[in-house]
């Protein structure tokens, strides 16, 4: 978008990985945080899109438009059936960050693809105490079958460590807080970690012993177990080699009753995680695809998913627009907080982050995945500037945008999922 | 033995080969012509509507390569979704011929297959129940874990129970929380009051003894029976140089001194105890603080709290509490073996035990700390977190594996002592039916109700129903819990009395409390608890008249004939209508009641929607006299009449819910029972059903004597997938 910035971007992408201790002082100046905020069930397209100017559903973002753009024409092609029949919600959720086609199965052999946040975490996660953070404010899960023959794993998980293992998101702000700041008792935390390390090492040995005796499929399960243990061990190492920040506010008490409060707390945790440089990669699922949430706080008593099958009904469309505005308002509030948080010399957190806000369905009534509702916010350390709306070429894979953002963070990937190149932003 | 089965197998193979020729002849002579005639216009001769070309299937073997596809073909023909309504239809005889052939040729096997052995991670409920049972705690550990993903309608499916670093972290945290709770020992003796206080002791309003300076408290204790007793107390004290020194006197004789090391207001309780042989009769007990005497201390300064004193015994009769068994009884090796055996649900080997003992030795701290570390490792071990991980080779499942299959199926928890000891002595299979009976009569079967029925019938979701506050401003949200309970009570009753499972559709009785009875506008129920009552209206018999089902399948502000029909088809009859076509033209506004039927009928004018909605909608319309909360209505809110007539998919005409239910019960009983069995089998085996399981389902159906709920469960337990460890 801005040539000067773009050149700087290339320069920064040449930076070699440096050891964290050295890196910190050096990189603190311009570190980009990457965020993904997911909204389910599509939007009321009449109110969300405008060829020019700000759409009514995005009115809450009015004060933020110098910091964000609506990106048009992005597509999640793998969310389409492509021969697999119904199940657009499951696919939309599963392919949004993976750019991959979810294997149609109600349980056996679930498979989609590693998600971009996890790929980013693997590339740059070593620079922070937590490689990534996955947050959610999703409602309690329903029992029974999920979307049209797809396992619920697809519909409820945005982040995937690899093609077969989802990374579950944390719902409880208090647990996130403790991840960031520890329990408050450093000595005890240290003792716990020592014991944890020894106990995990012990059971890891046991899994190795077992592994030799098992058949192939069982070994796959056990490999997953071992990978999980190694993940925790790495976390312990990082907890010991990175400073744990001192909390400046009280820990939240848990999950609040009100959905709005819950969202705000999680956004606050996201901000704190970035502010303290505890992690640079965060996903936040506001609700999972097919969410049947009602919104009494804005007097919308219909269920979101059912309203999204609006069939042109004016009352459903009006309610949908309310919901879209509700989410946009909370997102705007988050952006404002980032803008108000200093980061580096005269910059704000918002200057030094890149956040994608959006979902994998455009219109819940059509279940289409083209020209998705996507907002890009933040300046990626000065590499992105905004002017309201950015038109990509028709049916550009949303993964192209991911490639560019990763590039802004110094991570060059030849391709990701169904990407066809970088989207210039 | 092996050679016998080999011969047996080769006979089967021979039989199969012979049968195959007949099947092949039928295919080319009878079945293929029907398919060609009715299907090839769109799905053959180069036409591939919906990406389906049937002309690629020439030989029976070709069909067998794509059984999943033929399952769909079979379904579409059976439900008359194909050929489309505007095309020539198969005659009943032709339809029957094709369906019968597909079933025999593609889905029948000479042997019943067990399916693959799958190692299964404990899900949240199973983990919580198991840990609580192991440690004697009552913690909501599930809340500490990530929510489980589900497949095939259940949350105990092997393939989707993955484990990520986040899971591992949380399993670790949950184990810590549970072990810490298990170390807060409970006193279980007689609580002693001390009416006499001398010196600087007082009593707080909540019954604690507070020492501000040196002082004594006295009590008279009556011992009924001579024997060894334990005198125990919990105290906290100010920590200055040493903690306060408490001396315990029995009949004026000093028994023991304790320094109180727990700081004041400390959250963790530590029990101090002493054992003593006591004579029967009345005795004097005194607790005295002796090392503090600071006359200058401010009046309110606290030196020592004694929060609780107990005398328990005689001890010989009292052993076996969880705390004692975990941390006190026997040597460390005995305690570890006891714990590992229970936690891993099988006997442990010498090597396994010695590895864990080495961990105990390497651990620091007291015996209790060492044991805690070992237990932590036991609870993080793959042998604890996964089931079936160490079961034997292919063939009949070993009895420990069987014990776990039983206990997780019926209790969502670990096997109890009885199951484990029967497995240890190899007698569990002999006593299988008696054990199943015992298990089904146990209180723990509540977990089966919550987990199996909660998911099959989606009763877990009833409390999540959110009636529109605009539409139902007076709705009492507590009622949702009662609604779920009503249905649970009915099914528990059917299970308890081994009544035919179909009773859930027909029962002319139900279980209500006062508020639910009022919700139904029944009169005469006065007391508060749930009570078995006769249902006054035949329209409300069975769960189709339960508010749980009716509310679950409604929108927040109105009923949904489609959702109700779908529930009956999918959950009760096991018929999953195909998903709506891609981007179906959803022109209907399902919003105003009086025109709803008309609108849905218009919707069905569209042939791509018609065939499926013809399956679901009529059932929903049959239930329209129940509103979104399950209350009876004779007209819609705007006074428009409700029409509850319709036609079920095999052509049965009905007017009203009673007739519709009657048709389901008489004409669709096989579908209903098959569906229940399929769900039980998925839940028990932790996997989706494969084509070869059709044979097993038939077998279970045939073996379920009177089709009583218990009969069916026993038949599932005796089935090949449940009994065998592996199929190669």
Image (cartoon, coloured by chain):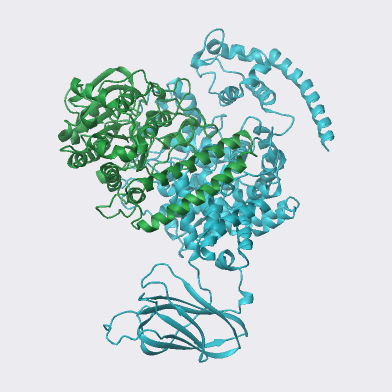
Quarter of the image with the C terminus of chain A is top left
In the image shown, does B701 or A375 lie closer to the viewer?
A375
Left or right of residue B252: residue A9: left
Residue most extreme to the top: B45
**Is residue B318 shown above or below A106?**
below
Colour cyan, chain? B
Q: Is residue B249 above or below residue B514?
A: below
Camera-side residue: A242 or A292? A242
Picture residue at 75% right of the left edge, 20% below the top: B20
Q: Nearer the viewer, residue B64 or B292?
A: B292
In the drawing, does residue B122 fall left or right of residue A242? Answer: right
- In the rendered image, residue A2, in percent from the top left (x then y), is placed at 19, 22
Q: Quadrant of the N terminus of chain A?
A: top left
Question: Which color has been applied to chain A in this rendered view?
Answer: green
The answer, for residue A285, to whether it is visible in the render is no
Whether residue B329 is visible, yes or no, is yes
Give the x, y percent position of residue B600.
41, 29
Give the residue at the far front of this rendering. Answer: A22
In which image quadrant can residue B260 be found?
bottom left
On the image, which quarter does residue B77 sit in? Answer: top right
Q: Position of residue B256 (x, y in %)?
A: 51, 83
| Residue B394 or residue B576, whichever sits in front | B394
Number of numbered discs: 0
Determine whether B600 is above or below B60 in the image. Answer: below
Residue B607: image x %, image y %? 45, 20
Q: Quadrant of residue A295?
A: top left
Q: Is residue B701 left or right of residue A120?
A: right
């Amino acid at each position: 978008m801005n040539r000067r910035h773009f050149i700087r971007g290339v320069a920064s992408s040449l930076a070699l990985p440096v050891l964290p201790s050295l890196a910190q002082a050096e990189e603190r100046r311009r570190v980009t945080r990457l965020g993904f905020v997911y909204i389910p069930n599509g939007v009321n397209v009449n109110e969300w899109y405008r060829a020019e100017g700000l759409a009514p559903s995005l009115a809450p973002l009015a004060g933020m438009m110098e910091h964000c753009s609506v990106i048009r024409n992005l597509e999640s092609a793998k969310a389409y059936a492509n021969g697999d029949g119904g199940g657009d919600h499951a696919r939309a959720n599963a392919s949004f960050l993976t750019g991959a086609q979810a294997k149609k199965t109600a349980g056996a052999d679930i498979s989609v693809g590693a998600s971009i946040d996890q790929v980013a975490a693997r590339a740059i996660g070593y620079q922070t105490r937590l490689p990534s953070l996955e947050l959610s404010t999703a409602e309690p899960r329903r029992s029974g079958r999920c979307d049209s023959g797809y396992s619920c794993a697809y519909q409820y998980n945005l982040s995937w460590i690899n093609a077969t293992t989802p990374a579950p998101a944390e719902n409880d702000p208090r647990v996130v807080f403790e991840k960031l700041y520890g329990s408050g008792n450093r000595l005890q935390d240290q003792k716990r970690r020592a014991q944890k390390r020894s106990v995990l090492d012990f059971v890891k040995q046991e899994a190795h012993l077992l592994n030799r005796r098992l058949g192939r499929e069982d070994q796959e399960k056990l490999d997953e177990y071992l990978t999980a243990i190694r993940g925790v061990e790495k976390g312990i190492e990082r907890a010991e080699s990175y400073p744990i920040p001192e909390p400046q506010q009280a820990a939240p008490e848990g999950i609040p009753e009100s959905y709005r409060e819950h969202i705000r707390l999680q956004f606050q945790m996201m901000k704190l995680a970035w502010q303290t440089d505890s992690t640079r990669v965060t996903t936040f699922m506001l609700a999972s695809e097919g969410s049947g949430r009602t919104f009494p706080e804005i007097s919308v008593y219909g269920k979101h998913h059912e309203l999204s099958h609006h069939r042109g009904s004016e009352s459903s469309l009006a309610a949908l627009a309310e919901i879209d505005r509700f989410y946009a308002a909370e997102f705007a509030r988050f952006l404002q907080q980032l803008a108000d948080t200093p980061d580096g010399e005269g910059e704000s957190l918002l200057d030094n982050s890149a956040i994608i806000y959006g979902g994998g369905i455009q219109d819940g009534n059509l279940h289409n995945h083209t020209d998705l509702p996507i907002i890009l916010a933040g300046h990626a350390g000065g590499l992105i500037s905004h002017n309201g709306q950015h038109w990509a070429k028709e049916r550009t894979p949303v993964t192209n945008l991911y490639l560019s953002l990763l590039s802004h963070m110094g991570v060059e990937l030849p391709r990701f999922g169904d990407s066809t190149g970088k989207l210039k932003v | 033995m092996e050679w016998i089965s080999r011969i047996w197998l080769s006979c089967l193979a021979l039989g199969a080969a012979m049968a195959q020729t007949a099947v092949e002849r039928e295919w080319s002579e009878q079945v293929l012509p029907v398919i060609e005639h009715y299907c090839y216009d769109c799905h053959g001769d180069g036409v591939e509507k919906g990406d389906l070309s049937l002309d690629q299937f020439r030989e029976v073997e070709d069909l067998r390569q794509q059984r999943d596809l033929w399952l769909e073909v079979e379904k579409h023909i059976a439900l008359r979704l194909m050929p489309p309504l505007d095309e020539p239809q198969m005659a009943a005889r032709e339809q029957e011929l094709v369906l019968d052939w597909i079933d025999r040729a593609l889905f029948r096997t000479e042997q019943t297959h067990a399916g693959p052995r799958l190692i299964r991670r404990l899900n949240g409920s199973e983990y919580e129940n198991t840990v609580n049972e192991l440690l004697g705690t009552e913690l909501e550990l599930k809340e500490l874990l990530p929510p489980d993903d589900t497949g095939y309608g259940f949350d105990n499916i092997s393939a989707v129970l993955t484990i990520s670093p986040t899971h591992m972290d949380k399993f670790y945290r949950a184990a810590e929380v549970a072990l810490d709770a298990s170390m807060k020992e409970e006193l279980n003796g007689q609580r002693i009051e001390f009416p006499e206080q001398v010196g600087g002791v007082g009593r707080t309003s909540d019954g604690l003894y507070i020492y501000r300076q040196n002082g004594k408290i006295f009590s008279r204790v009556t011992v009924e029976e001579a024997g060894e007793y334990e005198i125990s107390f919990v105290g906290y004290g100010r920590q200055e140089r040493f903690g306060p020194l408490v001396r315990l006197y029995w009949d004026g004789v000093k028994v023991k001194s304790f320094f109180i090391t727990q700081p004041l207001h400390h959250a963790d309780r530590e029990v101090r105890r002493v054992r003593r042989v006591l004579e029967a009769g009345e005795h004097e007990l005194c607790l005295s603080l002796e090392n503090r005497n600071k006359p200058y201390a401010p009046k309110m300064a606290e030196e020592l709290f004694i929060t609780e004193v107990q005398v328990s015994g005689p001890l010989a009769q009292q052993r076996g509490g969880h705390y004692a068994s975990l941390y006190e009884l026997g040597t460390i090796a005995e305690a570890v073996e006891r714990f590992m055996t229970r936690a891993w649900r099988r006997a442990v080997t010498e090597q396994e035990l010695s590895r864990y003992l080495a961990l105990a030795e390497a651990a620091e701290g007291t015996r209790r700390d060492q044991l805690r570390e070992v237990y932590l490792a036991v609870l993080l071990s793959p042998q604890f977190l996964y089931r079936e991980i160490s079961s034997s080779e292919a063939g009949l499942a070993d009895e420990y594996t069987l014990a776990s299959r039983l206990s997780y199926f019926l209790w969502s928890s670990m096997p109890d002592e009885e199951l484990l000891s029967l497995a240890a002595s190899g007698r569990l299979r002999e006593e299988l039916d008696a054990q199943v009976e015992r298990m089904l009569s146990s209180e723990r079967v509540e977990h089966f109700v919550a987990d199996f029925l909660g998911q099959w019938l989606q009763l877990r979701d009833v409390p999540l129903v959110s009636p529109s506050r605009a539409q139902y401003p007076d709705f009492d949200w507590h009622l949702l819990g009662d609604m779920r309970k009503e249905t649970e009570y009915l099914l528990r009753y059917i299970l308890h009395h081994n009544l035919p499972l179909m009773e859930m559709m027909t029962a002319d009785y139900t279980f209500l409390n006062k508020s639910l009875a009022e919700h139904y506008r029944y009169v005469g129920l006065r007391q508060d608890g749930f009570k078995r009552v006769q249902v006054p209206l035949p329209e409300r018999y069975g769960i189709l008249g339960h508010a749980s089902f009716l509310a679950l399948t409604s929108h927040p502000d109105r009923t949904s004939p489609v959702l109700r029909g779908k529930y009956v088809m999918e959950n009760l009859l096991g018929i999953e209508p195909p998903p709506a076509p891609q981007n179906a033209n959803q022109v209907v506004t399902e919003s105003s009641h009086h025109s709803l039927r008309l609108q849905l009928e218009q919707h069905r004018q569209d042939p791509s929607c018609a065939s499926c909605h013809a399956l679901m909608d009529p059932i929903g319309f049959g239930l329209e006299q129940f509103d979104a909360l399950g209350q009876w209505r004779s007209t819609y809110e705007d006074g428009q009449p409700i029409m509850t007539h319709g036609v079920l998919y095999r052509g049965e005409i009905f007017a009203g819910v009673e007739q519709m239910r009657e048709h389901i019960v008489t004409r669709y009983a096989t579908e209903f029972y098959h569906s229940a069995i399929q769900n039980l089998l998925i839940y028990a085996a932790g996997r989706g059903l494969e084509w070869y399981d059709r044979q097993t389902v038939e077998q279970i159906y045939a073996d379920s004597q009177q089709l009583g709920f218990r009969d069916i469960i026993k038949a599932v337990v005796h089935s090949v997938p449940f009994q065998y460890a592996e199929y190669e």
